[in-house]
Image: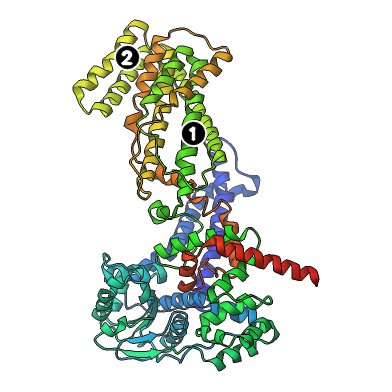
Amino acid sequence: MDHRRLARASRLVALVGAGGVTCLVLLPIAVNAATGGTAPRVLGPYATWLWPSLALLTAVTAALAAWEPLSVRLVQRRPAHPANRVAALERVERYVRARRDASLAEQVRLKLGVAPRVGPRLPTRARVPLVVAGEPGAGKTTLLLELAETLVARARADGDRPVPAVVDLGAWRRDDDFGEWLLGVLARRYRIGPRLGRTWLRDRRLALLFDGLDDVPEADRAECLAWITALKLPHVVLCCAGEDYERLPRYDVVHVEPLRRNDVLGLVAACGPRLDGLHEALTKDPDLVDEVRTPLAFGLLALAYRAGRAEYRGVLDTYLVESVARGPGRAERTLRALRFLARVADRRHDLVARHRLPRREVWLDFVEPAVVWKLFRRAVPGALAGAATALCLVVGLRLGLVAAGVVAVAAIGLPRGRFPAPKATAPGGKRWAATGFALGAALFGGLAAAGAWWGAQVARWPAWLAFGLVVAVAFGVALGLVRDRYWAVAGALAPAAVMVWTGPSPELLAGLGVGLCAGAAAGVGTGGLAAVWTGLRDLPAAGRGPRWLPAAGLVGVGLAAVAGARLGVPLDAVTGLLVGLAGTPVATRPVRAVAELLAKPLALDEFPLRRKAVVQSARDRVLLLDGDRFPHAAVRDHLAACDPVELGATAERRREAITDARRST
């Protein structure tokens, strides 16, 4: 352990000790003494030193906690400080080691004891940009990481050598300033601050190793290469599968050649009996060797054949089928979830299989028509029916059947709620409708009860205060509807006139609370659904609420009548309900957070609730590597374009064959 790590460990021990004594010993004793208690007898004559000791240890704890972040900031403000270079090299080394440990080649080496040979070593000094060219899966990234490790070791030994940094170009887009984007990558990945990064770029103290030029859109690659040339760094390495590098003014090229037949046979022989199935397949079908041209192809086939004989269907399909067939759960479900994750990763220009859904704009156009039909033609109408039924039931029990009937009739004025989704091939959706009904009834029933309780609490206020509150709410609702102060004042006069006649009665305030809660929920919910609807493909505009919605409300009125609700004609309660429900159009706004929440059920058909279990199973079967990354862009793209039904059926047949073989033995 060097002196810096020893000093950091010592500070951590001191921080834990000082913080523990302060929070667990001195602070409770001080609080006890301040509230009239006494200090423990063991303190004896030292009790007078309690508060000074508490202040001192608090200051020491705060200083130890702030030491490291403050020292980092101070050091980064001095670009020439040696600690910046040492820390950057450590972070680069840690990142490169993590990338290599999570690579497919490392998985092959761990499981089979041998790794495919990759092309020649890259030179550590270059006067012009060095291009590493080769077909996808040839091992360009592996060579780049090996070069990064070598450059880190040489930079440690020679202070004049530049600090290497591996940068993935796939995340850059034409709209981003390349310099600022590059500084952001250095800051996030290696904690090289923008000021320090600018200084090192200006002084040519960075060696940039760019990976993934092919992940940049083809129309943007020329500009990307122009930016790289403008950096004028002495050491630049660029991985590229195509010939876009020819746009560079000067460059040297290292071609990574494909695997030859002898290379493939030698690798299979080195694995011994663990790849007998692959050896037999190569013997029976010599043309198969021509498809195993890259270390990626060999690694995928080796992982597919490692557990026994496999039926060859092409490199990528064999890898997917054999991996899924030996895992738990339905093969089609697993492949569908992986296809969804692969599409999201492709849209985000990386290899990460995300546990959490990104923003809906990233994945909403992946949704199948059947799921759209189930949500918008089954779940949403079911939820509206449940909401109307529960709302009218609660209003009938609390305010009377006439008030509940008014709410049922007012449901026809819902500004959104009808989504004419095209009928799917296999509609179904009864569970979606039942689930929507239950959720809508529970939500609006609870909101109605909460609104009635709120009205009962406001009724305890002074009459003048409750009167003013109702008028203010009515004015705000009217102003939101008509956007005109004159008509808003006129709208506020109606409840004011009723209160002159009846006073701010508990029924009026309960009706106002119920109407506000239910109207706000209905407006926000339908507005969020409308925002999701507009993000889908080629669908007509959303319409007003369903025409049959009052019928669902009348069901709630009937249930309230069966439960013994009174009839009555409560003018004050109806007035409060209408004022509150009039706020529904005002609340119908596309709130992003609500739209994101309501869009998530659309992904359930592709990405189930037990998504972590799916990702863990894929990781166990080497369909994903450490860090939940796809093994290669070729694997990601193949998954994104696959047919999970056909491939899943093949995997199920393969699973049955494996089960039968195990039973026979």
Name above or below for residue 157 compared with residue 59.
below
The residue mark sitting in front, 2 or 1, is 1
Image quadrant containing the C terminus: bottom right
The image shows a total of numbered marks equal to: 2
Query: Amino acid under label 1?
Result: Ala
The percent position of residue 625, horizontal first and vertical second, equals: 55, 70
Q: Secondary structure at mark 2?
A: helix
Q: CA distance from mark 2 to mark 1?
A: 31 Å
Residue 422 got which mark? none
User: Is 608 in front, or is 660?
Assistant: 660
Residue 495 got which mark? 2
Mark 2 nearby-residue class (10 Å; few <14, some 14–19, many ≥20): many
User: Is 342 in front, or is 238?
Assistant: 342
Residue situated furthest top in the rendering: 501
Q: Secondary structure at mark 1?
A: helix
The percent position of residue 258, horizontal first and vertical second, equals: 47, 88
Say whether residue 190 is left or right of residue 205. right
The percent position of residue 124, horizontal first and vertical second, equals: 39, 90
**Circle 1 sits on which residue?**
383
Q: Is residue 35 visible?
A: no
Would you identify the image quadrant in which residue 284 lies? bottom right
Name above or below for residue 185 compared with residue 578.
below
Query: Amino acid under label 2?
Result: Pro
Q: Is residue 282 visible?
A: yes
